[in-house]
Image: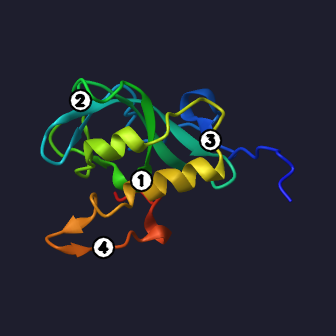
Amino acid sequence: MDSGTIVYSNLEELSKSIYQLTDGEADIKGWPVRNEAGDAVGKVRDLLFDPEQNAVRYVIVELSDMGEDLEEKAVLIPIGLANLAEDKKEVVLPDIHHDQFRAMPRYIIGEVTPQIEDEIRSVIGSPAALRIEDEIVEIDRANFNRHQA
């Protein structure tokens, strides 16, 4: 029976945590975010850190300049989907469709629940984002939050 109690994920914004970037780790706050096609998506507001796992889990992206039909809002992108551009200070995301960004829940500080994390996985793991030719590829959930260096 559901008691109506909301359980929040134990995540902290990196800028408000005691976690310190080590030498060689880029501070990507404020960097522009683009998709693989080079289209502007927004900018990095911060990172969400899991203190229990001592790991960054999400990039907080402020969506902007994506057209009139997509509201400007902050969304969470799993760190394993974000890559750093090789030649400039820029974060590159896979080609996530506008409908997927529209369907993503708005990020609200301190209000990330396991249900919201599941919703993010569901939206990003939808067939439109992962279609390769006519074959639909299932997302590898074990590697979903792993950063690919």
Q: Which residue shows up at 36% across the image and 38% down it? A: 102
- Graded by Cα atoms within 10 Å as few (under 14), some (14 to 19) or many (20 or more), the crowding at tag 2 reads some
Q: Mark 4 is on which residue type?
A: Val
Circle 1 crowding by C-alpha within 10 Å: few under 14, some 14–19, many from 20: some
- According to the picture, the residue beneath numbered tag 4 turns out to be 137
Which quadrant of the rendered structure holds the N terminus? bottom right
Label 1 vs 3, first from the N-terminus = 3
Residue at image mark 3? 112
Q: Amino acid at mark 2?
A: Met
Give the x, y percent position of residue 79.
43, 50
Cα–Cα span, label 4 and label 3 = 27 Å
Q: Secondary structure at mark 1?
A: helix
Structural distance between the alpha carbons of marks 3 and 2? 24 Å
Q: Nearer the viewer, mark 1 or mark 3?
A: 1
Outermost residue toward the bottom in this view: 135
Viewer-nearest of labels 3 and 2? 2
Residue 54 appears in view: no
> Does residue 146 appear to the left or right of 52 in the view shown?
left
- The quarter of the displayed image where residue 49 is located: top right
Which callout, 1 or 4, points at the residue further toward the start of the chain?
A: 1
Q: Earlier in the sequence, mark 4 or mark 3?
A: 3
Q: Is residue 98 above or below residue 67?
A: below
Q: Earlier in the sequence, mark 3 or mark 2?
A: 2
Query: Residue beneath label 1, please?
Result: 123
Q: Are marks 1 and 3 in contact (CB under 8 Å)?
A: no
Whichever of callouts 1 and 2 sits on the residue coming sooner in the sequence is 2
**Looking at the figure, which quarter contains the C terminus?**
bottom left
